[in-house]
Image: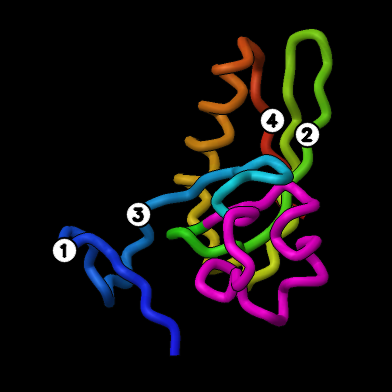
Amino acid sequence: GQAYWFGSDIPSKSKKIKSVMVLPSYDEYTVGYRDRSHVIAPTLMKQTGNGIFKPTLLIDGHVSGTWKRVESKNKIQIEITPLIAEHKIPKRLLKETTKAFANFNGKEHELIIV
């Protein structure tokens, strides 16, 4: 078995989704581990480029999809390709996260879920 350590402030069985992140390709969250099974299901490895080669969507720390962006002068269009059931995607949190990304880049925001 593999031992993983988490802080005592992290609930172990909470059903409420607390975080949504969009990570770039080669982010150290996935690159830093040889065994990525703690963040990505083995069945999703190929679709996500082993969690390394494609930008990833994280939901509560688990790879749940991929994303890409198309930039114009004033707008960033972010296209999410979910790899989990669409009803499990927290759309409000996803919109907040992608909007923050666009705001950081000083651009308008458009979110597309394919």
Depth check, front residue: 23 or 52? 52
Depth check, front residue: 89 or 22? 22
Quarter occupied by residue 81: bottom right
* Circle on res. 69: 2
Quarter occupied by residue 104: top right
Q: Which residue is mark 4?
A: 110
* Circle on res. 8: 1
Q: Callout 4: 10 Å neighbours few (<14), some, many (20+)?
A: some
Amino acid on which the number 1 mark rests in the picture: Ser
Amino acid on which the number 4 mark rests in the picture: Glu
Name the image quarter holding the N terminus: bottom left
SS assignment at label 1: loop
Amino acid on which the number 2 mark rests in the picture: Arg
Q: Residue at x 67, y 59 (%)?
A: 65
Front tag of 1 and 4: 1
Q: Residue at x 30, y 68 (%)?
A: 5
